[in-house]
Image (cartoon, rainbow, N blue to C red):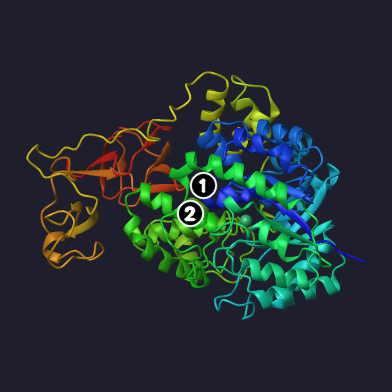
């Protein structure tokens, strides 16, 4: 009597999301899909997660069209998607009517298995999506996000076996058709995998699936121990997009189990051939592949706990921002920020929130600026944190919120008014299609841009052109030396006045002499008079974009009086909306960038007149 291990392939979703910033195009999937259908996979994860956002934001591909295409090419393999509970495939809590419609349309367009998770393992955030999946008659896979408290192994005061068992029972009681343990950080150690899978299988009478990332190098070992403990389904992917921060490769696992009781019985020759073809198309994505490191594994993930997608995202965002040299500082800041926020599992959207806040803490000072999602999280808008958040941050926020802020609801989605009709109305000039309206409902800014392009009202971006506008000409005199990549901005406070200066070590890259770390310039240099480039004129302060992004909205008009810290505008950067505060008391002199425009790092967003 054999008990074949079932394999779920993630090549078309998580694998390229983890290794190449979710950029694999439908055409390259379609070329492989028909043969993938005959391999013998239990299911294929092809949709959801970041694919929906990346398709509309970067690839100018209709994600619904991708799903229909893959469904037609994969008629024999159930298709699965990753759904972030009440956050769907976006980054905030959506209203119930958007959740219902999105699940319904996903099922209608071809999804068979819905893997539903919540970043905080907060069950009320799964309820609405779970009901919608049941109503659509599809397979409901409820998910436990796996993480560790801080020691690198299961246990400790928060993430111990009791915690995971109580989660598994809760998901069973919610009507799950199967349960997934989702180890997004590659933190599940082999013997913990054995103990966890044994415990769940001995008590919970449901199929159990394991999703892990290779990041730390443990995933293939953990997978094997999980299989020995009775795991039913394992997530794998084709070798060219396996390992590193992606899933374990299918080929060695299939061969390791061959001929035994758990032989998955897949067509290995076919897998190898398809892998060759995948390998052949990947060079064109070279710019998005994270291959700068020699090591295939990142052993340090065991201490910094950063999931693969988050790490690759953060690396590319920091590089775009010209701050890649601060990566080590950001990695060191992440566990501190995570502790302040009550030890959330680092998975979307918590991973983006913690990551972006850690970046902000390093670049601008700890909590000098809090992103809107972090504020919302601290107010309880994402659900109950796993453990208490920093009271200092809660108090700081309560100060700005005022005393009459309403208490957080038990289920964050329940307080939101319906959103779908307004979304349909907002795009009614462009389209009456419900799938289009859902794109807008999820991402008003990038979604609208995508829809305008899709319906021929805007030209698609030239794929050969840089993704952002050219930098504005500098205002420095022509005899000024060129600014090097080592230049850093500093806030300088002199006698109650505020200046923003840019400090660039003389002599460019340090060829000789003692290099000064960018975070600690010599005091004399930092306290020097404001530089020509950073200070447009006496009595004016320019507000530069701290990161490349999209200017979402303006909170002020030209001529308005503002105080230091007053919100000036909202910038979407690193997929987070950030309120940019006024650096000084004064009047708004100019707002050179219109809402909706893409901005470069350092581009002036506002000028504040400080004397009048
Ligand atoms: Co994953």
For mark 2, give the secondary structure: helix
* Rendering coords of residue 242 (x, y %): 59, 55
Residue behind mark 1: 21
The residue at the point 84 percent across, 67 percent down is: 261
User: Which residue is more in the foreground, 84 or 270?
Assistant: 270
Alpha-carbon span between mark 1 and mark 2 = 7 Å
Determine if residue 373 is in view: yes
Per the rendering, the mark at residue 496 is none
Farthest residue in the right direction?
1
Q: Residue 325 is drawn in which quadrant? A: bottom left
User: Which residue is more in the foreground, 110 or 553?
Assistant: 110
Farthest residue in the left direction?
479
In the depicted structure, whether residue 292 falls above or below residue 551: below
The residue at the point 76 percent across, 57 percent down is: 142
* Rendering coords of residue 588 (x, y %): 28, 38
* Rendering coords of residue 365 (x, y %): 34, 62
Residue 152 as seen in the image, left or right of residue 571: right
Give the class, few, some or many, for how many residues have Cα within 10 Å of label 1's Cα (few <14, many ≥20). many
Q: Residue 513 is drawn in which quadrant? A: bottom left
* Rendering coords of residue 292 (x, y %): 41, 55
Q: Are marks 1 and 2 in contact (CB under 8 Å)?
A: yes
The picture quadrant for ligand 1 comes to bottom right
User: Which residue is more in the foreground, 452 or 284?
Assistant: 284
For mark 1, give the secondary structure: loop
Per the rendering, the mark at residue 312 is 2
In the depicted structure, whether residue 347 falls above or below residue 577: below
Give the class, few, some or many, for how many residues have Cα within 10 Å of label 2's Cα (few <14, many ≥20). many
Residue 58 as seen in the image, left or right of residue 418: left
């Amino acid at each position: 009597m054999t008990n074949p291990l079932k394999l779920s392939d993630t090549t078309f979703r998580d694998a390229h999301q983890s290794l190449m910033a979710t950029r694999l195009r439908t055409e390259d999937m379609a070329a492989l899909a028909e043969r993938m259908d005959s391999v013998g996979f239990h299911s294929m994860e092809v949709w959801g997660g970041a694919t929906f956002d990346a398709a509309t934001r970067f690839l100018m591909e209709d994600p619904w069209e991708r799903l229909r295409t893959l469904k037609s090419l994969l008629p024999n393999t159930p298709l699965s998607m990753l759904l972030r509970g009440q956050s769907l495939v976006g980054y905030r809590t959506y209203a119930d009517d958007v959740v219902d419609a999105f699940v319904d349309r996903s099922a209608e367009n071809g999804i068979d298995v819905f893997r539903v998770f919540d970043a905080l393992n907060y069950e009320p955030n799964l309820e609405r999506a779970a009901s919608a999946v049941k109503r659509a008659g599809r397979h409901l896979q409820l998910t436990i996000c796996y993480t560790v408290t801080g020691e690198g192994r299961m246990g400790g005061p928060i993430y111990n076996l009791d915690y995971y068992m109580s989660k598994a029972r809760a998901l069973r009681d919610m009507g799950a058709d199967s349960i997934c343990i989702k180890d997004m950080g590659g933190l599940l150690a082999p013997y913990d995998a054995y103990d966890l899978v044994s415990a769940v299988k001995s008590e919970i009478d449901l199929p159990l699936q394991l999703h892990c990332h290779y990041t730390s190098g443990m995933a293939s070992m953990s997978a094997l121990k999980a299989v020995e403990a009775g795991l039913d389904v394992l997530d794998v992917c084709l070798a060219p997009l396996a390992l590193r921060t992606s899933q374990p490769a299918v080929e060695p696992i299939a061969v390791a189990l061959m001929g035994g009781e758990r032989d998955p019985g897949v067509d290995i020759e076919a897998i190898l051939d398809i892998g060759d073809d995948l390998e052949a198309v990947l060079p064109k994505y070279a710019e998005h592949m994270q291959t700068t490191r020699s090591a295939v594994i990142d052993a340090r993930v065991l201490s910094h706990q950063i999931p693969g997608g988050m790490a690759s995202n953060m690396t590319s965002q920091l590089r775009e921002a010209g701050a890649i040299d601060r990566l080590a500082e950001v990695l060191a800041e992440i566990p501190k920020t995570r502790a302040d926020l009550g030890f959330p599992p680092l998975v979307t959207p918590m991973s983006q929130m913690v990551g972006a806040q850690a970046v902000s803490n390093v670049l601008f000072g700890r909590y000098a600026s809090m992103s809107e999602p972090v504020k919302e999280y601290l107010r309880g808008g994402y659900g109950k944190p796993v453990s208490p958040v920093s009271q200092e941050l809660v108090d700081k926020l309560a100060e700005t919120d005022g005393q009459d802020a309403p208490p957080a609801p038990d289920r964050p989605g329940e307080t939101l008014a319906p959103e779908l009709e307004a979304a349909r109305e907002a795009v009614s000039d462009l389209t009456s299609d419900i799938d289009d309206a859902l794109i807008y409902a999820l991402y008003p800014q990038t979604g609208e841009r995508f829809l305008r392009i899709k319906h021929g009202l805007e030209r698609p971006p030239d794929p050969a052109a840089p993704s952002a506008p050219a930098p504005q000409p500098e205002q420095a005199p022509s005899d000024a030396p060129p600014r090097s990549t080592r230049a850093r901005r500093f806030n300088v406070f002199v006698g109650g006045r505020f200046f923003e200066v840019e400090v660039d070590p003389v002599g460019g890259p340090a060829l000789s002499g003692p290099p000064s770390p960018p975070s600690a310039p010599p005091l004399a240099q930092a306290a020097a008079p404001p530089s020509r480039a950073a200070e447009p004129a006496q009595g004016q302060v320019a507000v530069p974009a701290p990161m490349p992004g999209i200017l979402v909205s303006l909170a002020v008009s030209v001529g308005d009086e503002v105080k230091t810290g007053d919100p000036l505008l909202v910038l979407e950067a690193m997929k987070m909306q950030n309120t940019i505060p006024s650096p000084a008391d004064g009047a708004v002199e100019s707002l050179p960038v219109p809402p909706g425009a893409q901005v470069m790092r350092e581009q002036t967003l506002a000028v504040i007149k400080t004397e009048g």
